[in-house]
Image: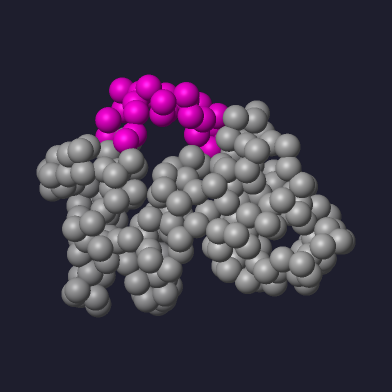
Amino acid sequence: ACFESGTVLSALSTDIDKKELLEFVNKVQPKLFIYDSSVSQHIAVLLKLEIPKLKLLEIGTSYEWFLNEYPDERNSSTINKNDTASIKLALQKQPIPYCNDTYIKNIQIANQNKKNGLQNKNITTFLCGIPITCEENTLIFCNMLSGNTIIIPEEYTPNYLLKLVEKHNVNCLYVSSELLSSIAESDKLESYNFKSLVSIIYNSEKLTEAQLTKTEKLFGPIIQHRDAL
């Protein structure tokens, strides 16, 4: 889910019942629902009836028109196709084809869709504690294209990370489970203010029961393993 740009990407089950669907939509309150009519037409019809103010965009001719309406020059941060070619996708670890214009344009929509007012003004800064160059990286890179993102160096200390959280009022924290547990065991936790955090997503292997208990006690319900997203 790309909450940082105000866009939520969600794979809805085709047999989701009406109650669950409306609960999800009312909780997230999207302004635009993009759907494929070949699999989600019934969902679009239901949403149009129940939430008439919700904008619907069907993948197809209208979708391609929508993409073409927003040329690259409106982007505040340039996306270089040659750069994106070297970025590894989540899990599959496959490079993004630099010729895949549709993918890049989708990133641009998620990154700066101004017409539909999808920017999330509540979340401002993201701290990625997972080096994007390491072999174990399974972090989706488009999560970091919103602009206000800090990537910490591979050589770090828990206190250094907490200092960054406090200094930049970090809202979302992407970390490895090893880093998360080392933060919880820091002897200087009380010296830092990390109340700005609203979401902590940890990657890689799951924490042990003891580590999980300690981190939950420290951070509460805002921590979540990547596999649970």
Which residue: 70% across, 72% down?
Answer: 220
Q: Which residues are magenta?
A: 78-102
Position in image of residue 193 (x %, y %): 67, 69
Q: Looking at the image, which is closer to me, 55 or 21?
A: 55
Q: Is residue 48 above or below residue 11?
A: below
Q: Is residue 142 above or below residue 163?
A: above
What main secondary structure does the magenta stretch of the protein show?
loop
Position in image of residue 146 (x %, y %): 40, 49
In which quadrant of the rendered view does residue 14 lie? bottom left
Point out the image quarter for the C terminus.
Answer: bottom right
Specify the color scheme. one colour
* Residue 47 falls left or right of residue 179: left
Q: Looking at the image, which is closer to me, 130 or 210?
A: 130
- Can residue 167 be seen here? The reply is yes
In which quadrant of the rendered view does residue 102 lie? top left
Which residue: 23% across, 56% down?
Answer: 114
Which residue: 51% across, 30% down?
Answer: 88
Which residue: 64% across, 30% down?
Answer: 134
* Residue 15 falls left or right of residue 48: right
Q: Is 60 included in the stretch rendered in magenta? A: no
Position in image of residue 66 (x %, y %): 16, 47
* Residue 132 falls left or right of residue 59: right
Q: Is 85 included in the stretch rendered in magenta? A: yes
Q: How many marks?
A: 0
* Residue 71 falls left or right of residue 186: left
- Can residue 21 be seen here? The reply is no
Position in image of residue 112 (x %, y %): 29, 51
